[in-house]
Image (cartoon, rainbow, N blue to C red):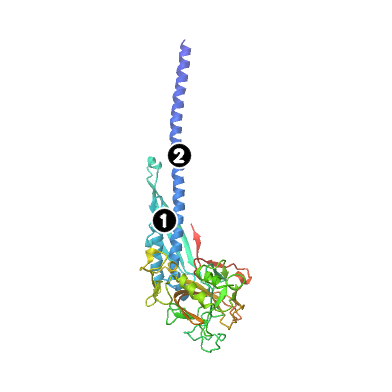
Amino acid sequence: MRENRKGCRSIGGERGSVLVIVAFSMVMLLAVSALAIDLANFYMARAQAQRAADAGALAGAKAFIITGCTTSGCTSGGVQETLGRQQAEAAGDQNYIAGQTASIQDSDVTFSYPTPQEPQITVTAGRNVPTLFAKLFGIATAKVSARATAEAYNTSGGGSAPVGTACLKPFLVPNCDPTHTSPVNPVCADGSTNRGLIFDPTTGAVEHPQTYPAGIIGMSWQLHTEAAPSQWYLVGFGDAPPSSGNALRNHIIECASGIYTCGTTLTTANGNMVGPVSQGIQTLINADAYGFNHNQDSIDTSVGPPFAITGGMNNPNPALRGKVFYDYSESPSVATVPVYSGNALVPGGSGVTIVGYLQIFIQDVVHKGNDDHIDVVILNAASCGGTSGGSGSPPSGGAGGGTVGPVIAAGGSPIPIRLIRTN
């Protein structure tokens, strides 16, 4: 009998040990579950922080283009840094980390300049993320952050990779500056000896990168069909020039289908098609009639860059109508056009090679007899680089058949913006 009672007591003691082990295991399981759930929350917040940093860097990099400094040469402390911070912070306000706005601050934005034509912006986005179960162990919040670097890339500064754009307009502009006459471009179509170069065909550098009147940024230029340094030709996108006036209008109104990189050969149109040109431009810039101040956007070049654009009453974005803004991508009047060497062409099938791009603001179009006058302002310039022979041909790469792949600009800009580092 005694032995049996001792046996019962022994079994009861073991049962008590099991309860202790189970209780301890429950605590450990709770701790592991808390860690797993909070880690998953942190990973999600980290991904959101990376998206906010990426968005801030890309938005801030647009300031390099808007201020024109990728053409003139970006330097530390320039106006592009103030605008870049503003745009990065605005992007932060539109992105969330664990339910809180990213709230990018001035101290979270830094700039670097590997070359004056290849400026970079680095943005850090972070937040203190509240924990869920880790609070039970005294951990209330954890810092989550991410960083991204974006750059604007202009080969006019000597870059090795050619550029291209996904949204060209069908106006072929000669490498003939009608205002700055030195150095001379000897191949300009009218045979004149006092027409300057926009791009140096040997180095690819922009000859006059400053703000007008010293340079071309903000310079007015009237494009027309007469044989003059400001002549322009219509080109087709695809294998042939536009076959009809309706096709040409669509080329003007819509983005060109496909990517047109440095070295691409374009075909000039047969005739100037002045009616479709003026109609297409009028539709593109949302003007009620030909000429200035017909409810299209307007630009003020007296101060800047960046140049202030005032939204016309026909701007597609109702929030911009009558408002002043500086983001060129918001205006339908901003377009990118290809540049060729400038030699005389015969409309109706001439093949020409893209040697650069101009970003322009189209102010108006005026239909006069057999000619359409298009008044534009130059906002940016990007060349395809130069050649040691000085012929004006683009460097190897892109459509030219070399080994260096093109860097593609989106949204109609001639200067690509790209993320180069995230962490």
Instruction: Give the farthest residue toward the right.
Output: 401
Residue at mark 1: 95
Q: Using a 10 Å C-alpha cutoff, classify the residue at mark 2 as few (fewer than 14 neighbours), some (14 to 19) or many (20 or more).
A: some
Question: Which amino acid type is shown beneath numbered disc 1?
Answer: Asn
Q: Residue 80 location in percent, x, y?
A: 41, 70
Tell me if 254 is positioned left or right of 134 in this view: right
99 to 237, vertically: above or below: above
Q: Residue 291 location in percent, x, y?
A: 42, 77
Find the distance from the CA under tag 1 to the CA under tag 2.
29 Å
Query: Camera-side residue: 159 or 86?
Result: 86
Instruction: Give the farthest residue toward the top.
Output: 1
> What residue is at 46 percent from the left and 63 percent from the top?
58
Helix or strand or loop: what does disc 1 sit on?
loop
Mark yes or no: residue 382 visible: no
Q: Residue 82 location in percent, x, y?
A: 38, 68
Mark yes or no: residue 16 visible: yes
> What residue is at 47 percent from the left and 19 percent from the top?
11
Question: Which amino acid type is shown beneath numbered disc 2?
Answer: Ser
Query: Camera-side residue: 417 or 325?
Result: 325
Residue at mark 2: 33
Helix or strand or loop: what does disc 2 sit on?
helix
Kindly indicate whether the residue at mark 2 contacts the one at mark 1 (C-beta within 8 angstroms). Answer: no
Q: Nearer the viewer, mark 1 or mark 2?
A: 1
Query: Camera-side residue: 294 or 265?
Result: 294
Q: Using a 10 Å C-alpha cutoff, classify the residue at mark 1 as few (fewer than 14 neighbours), some (14 to 19) or many (20 or more).
A: many
| Residue 392 lies in quadrant | bottom right
Among the two numbered marks 1 and 2 on one chain, the one whose residue lies closer to the N terminus: 2
> What residue is at 45 percent from the left and 26 percent from the top?
17
Q: Residue 95 location in percent, x, y?
A: 41, 56
